[in-house]
């Protein structure tokens, strides 16, 4: 997912919100789960609306909005008001047990490992794109991906836990 220069500098509020939904929402889902991630994304969109003039002048509005999302997420993690990743698995009946096990294994990763693994291997982002959005070095993304995959491999080989689409090496 290599964005072109036009995608990085939206010319309208609609373009900015389009970027939020295509670039930021997968990050929030990966880190916080679908329920909480979607709620945080809505709050980020509201913040964007209230600060559109400043955002349109920034060189990296998505990086800024990612930082805003971290601030918005504090109330969910601090007070544990809502379940975060992987959500409320106990309430959901999966027909395919492998999906449930995959989510549990992904939940065992640190938030940074899960985000980096899912963005790189699940959503097809480049390491550079992940590093830019998360405002970390590309080597840090590489470390998170490698450590996350190592934990998943260990879980698969030691516990015979099926990870959908994941083969231990």
Image: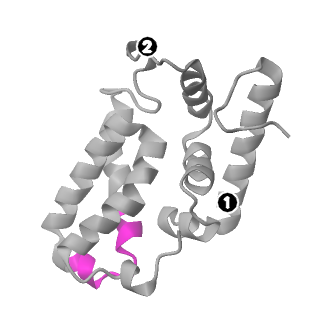
Mark 1 and mark 2 lie on one chain; the one further toward the N terminus is 2
User: Magenta includes 56?
Assistant: yes
Residue 70 appears at what percent x and percent y?
A: 38, 51
Image vertical order of residue 13 relative to residue 97, above or below: below
Residue 116 appears at what percent x and percent y?
A: 59, 52
* Residue sticking out furthest to the right: 169
The residue closer to the viewer here, 21 or 49, is 21
Secondary structure category for the residue under label 2: helix
Which class describes the residues within 10 Å of circle 1: few (<14), some (14-19), or many (20+)? Answer: some
Q: Which residue is mark 2?
A: 90
Which residue is rendered at x = 30% and y = 44% of the image? 38
Which residue is rendered at x = 38% and y = 26% of the image? 83
Left or right of 145? Residue 46 is: left
Q: Is residue 10 visible?
A: yes
* Total numbered labels: 2
Q: Is residue 66 visible?
A: no
Magenta segment: 54-65
Q: Which residue is mark 1?
A: 140
Left or right of 132? Residue 138 is: right
- Estimate the spatial distance between the alpha carbons at disc 1 and disc 2, rounded to whole Å: 33 Å
């Amino acid at each position: 997912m290599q964005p072109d220069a036009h995608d990085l500098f939206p010319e309208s509020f609609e373009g900015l919100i389009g970027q939020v939904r295509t670039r930021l929402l997968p990050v929030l889902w990966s880190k916080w789960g679908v329920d909480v991630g979607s709620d945080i994304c809505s709050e980020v969109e509201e913040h964007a609306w209230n600060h559109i003039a400043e955002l349109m002048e920034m060189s990296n509005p998505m990086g800024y909005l990612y930082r805003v999302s971290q601030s918005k997420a504090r109330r969910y993690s601090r007070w544990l008001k809502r379940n975060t990743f992987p959500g409320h698995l106990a309430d959901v009946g999966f027909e395919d047990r492998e999906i449930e096990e995959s989510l549990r294994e992904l939940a065992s990763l640190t938030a940074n490992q899960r985000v980096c693994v899912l963005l790189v291997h699940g959503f097809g982002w480049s390491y550079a794109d992940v590093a830019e959005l998360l405002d970390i070095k590309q080597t840090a993304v590489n470390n998170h991906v490698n450590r996350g995959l190592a934990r998943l491999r260990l879980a698969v080989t030691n516990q015979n836990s099926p990870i959908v689409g994941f083969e231990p090496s």
